């Protein structure tokens, strides 16, 4: 287990943590102007999540971009544990991943870890979790990820794609490494203990699929980092390029401190929430404001600890100037929380309305995202297209 605070594992993480400290603990690098300029060179512009350092740390992003520039084969990889419907915290890295895919035209491998979520869940059946994997694919479609370049691997159904790689990984990981990295104990079920081999396997899979070394970039929340540390350590001995990462901060829930989480549904905005319900959640949300309007006008609010502000900053305000104005209007007491929340509630409702329409249309072509509809059996890994 990562012994120093703050505590972050794939299953337990806070949103308002000392992210600089996390970088040091994890041994990653902060995103600097150099990497940002390199990215601008290939994308032509910068996504707000880069400009605002929502994606803020990395491992070898510079090398991945240089590989892309030099014409080496590159791919993206991210994923989802489909334990329920998707909320805004889940789609945050997907929005950025879609932008990267659009700008660079590379394939994305998207893992649905229905096996992991079943092994981890106390309450949900495998069938229920597996059904959510398909529901979550609708969100990828609604965000506009290109089905020709987005290949979804549902672990429990597409295991043949991963298993030949996973067995090689499994042989190299000891139980003590698993315990030290993920905090597993003697009472952890053996499904969970095997599972990391599958999440790591996708990082190597494109190299097998294309039959040439493929540089894989993983945009994901920093809470997933423990997997990638092992993936990088093992890659050379298994003959794969080390996967590279770009880490994002976690979207806070609409209460104090925690990340947006399914364990607190009243503080999470789901993509399937009726827009009116989502509005109510925003209006009931915690803020960094003062207890009364009078005090807010006198003392100002604190946007740095405010989940409402974070929603603007991380997703819902594209314009840097307007975001900055909101920040200072809050600090100086010119903006009241009711007004600020009402505006966000409206933006969230509009987003959901459009997203849900696209989501429903995507039911007609969901299979276009499934890897099994595009590639042959794993030993040949030949494209059907
Ligand atoms: Fe948060 Fe807005 Fe209130 Fe400031 S005015 S504390 S940003 S809700």
Image (cartoon, rainbow, N blue to C red):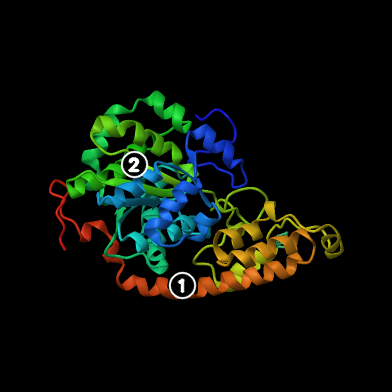
Tell me, yes or no, if residue 312 can be seen here.
yes
Dot 1: few (<14), some (14–19), or many (≥20) neighbours within 10 Å? some
Identity of the residue drawn at 25% across and 57% down: 371
Identity of the residue drawn at 57% across and 69% down: 348
* Among numbered discs 2 and 1, the one appearing first in the sequence: 2
| Residue that label 2 marks | 243
Q: Quadrant of residue 213?
A: top left
Q: Looking at the rendered structure, which numbered label has been put on residue 356?
A: 1
Q: Quadrant of residue 313?
A: bottom right
**Residue 123: x %, y % from top left:** 47, 48
Tell me, yes or no, if residue 132 can be seen here.
no
Q: Nearer the viewer, residue 294 or 280?
A: 294
Q: Quadrant of ligand 1?
A: bottom right
**Residue 294: x %, y % from top left:** 87, 64
Identity of the residue drawn at 59% across and 32% down: 5
Q: Nearer the viewer, residue 178 or 321?
A: 321
Q: Nearer the viewer, residue 78 or 40?
A: 40
Identity of the residue drawn at 19% across and 49% down: 210
Q: Is residue 206 left or right of residue 272?
A: left
**Front tag of 2 and 1:** 2
Seen in the picture, residue 31 relative to 285 is either above or below; the reply is above
């Amino acid at each position: 287990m990562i012994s120093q605070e703050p505590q972050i594992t794939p299953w337990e993480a806070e949103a308002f943590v000392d992210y600089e400290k996390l970088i040091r603990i994890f041994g990653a690098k902060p995103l600097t102007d150099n990497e940002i300029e390199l990215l601008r060179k290939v994308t032509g512009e910068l996504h707000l999540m880069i400009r605002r350092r929502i994606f803020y740390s990395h491992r070898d992003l510079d090398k991945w971009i240089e590989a892309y520039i030099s014409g080496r084969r590159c791919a993206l990889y991210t994923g989802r544990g489909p334990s329920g419907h998707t909320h805004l915290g889940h789609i945050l890295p997907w929005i950025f991943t879609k932008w990267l895919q659009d700008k660079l035209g590379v394939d994305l491998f998207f893992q649905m870890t229905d096996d992991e979520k079943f092994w981890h869940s106390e309450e949900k059946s495998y069938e229920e979790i597996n059904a959510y994997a398909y529901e979550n694919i609708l969100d990828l479609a609604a965000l506009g990820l290109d089905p020709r370049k987005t290949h979804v691997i549902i672990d429990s159904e597409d295991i043949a794609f991963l298993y030949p790689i996973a067995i090689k990984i499994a042989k190299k990981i000891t139980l003590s490494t698993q315990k030290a990295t993920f905090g597993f104990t003697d009472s952890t079920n053996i499904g969970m203990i095997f599972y990391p081999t599958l999440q790591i396997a996708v990082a190597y899979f494109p190299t097998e699929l294309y039959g040439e070394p493929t540089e894989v970039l993983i945009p994901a929340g920093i809470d997933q980092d423990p997997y990638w540390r092992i993936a990088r350590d093992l890659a050379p001995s298994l003959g794969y390029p080390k996967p590279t990462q770009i880490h994002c901060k976690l979207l806070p829930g609409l209460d104090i401190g925690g990340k947006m989480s399914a364990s607190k549904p009243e503080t999470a905005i789901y993509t399937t929430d009726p827009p009116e319900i989502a509005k109510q959640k925003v209006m009931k949300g915690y803020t960094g404001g003062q207890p009364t309007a009078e005090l807010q006008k006198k003392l100002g609010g604190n946007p740095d600890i405010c989940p409402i502000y974070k929603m603007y900053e991380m997703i819902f305000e594209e314009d840097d100037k307007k975001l900055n104005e909101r920040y200072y209007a809050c600090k100086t007491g010119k903006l009241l929380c009711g007004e600020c929340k009402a505006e966000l509630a409206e933006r969230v409702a509009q987003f959901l309305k459009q997203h849900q329409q696209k989501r429903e249309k995507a039911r007609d072509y969901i299979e276009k995202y499934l890897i099994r509809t595009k590639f042959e059996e794993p030993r040949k890994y030949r494209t059907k297209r």
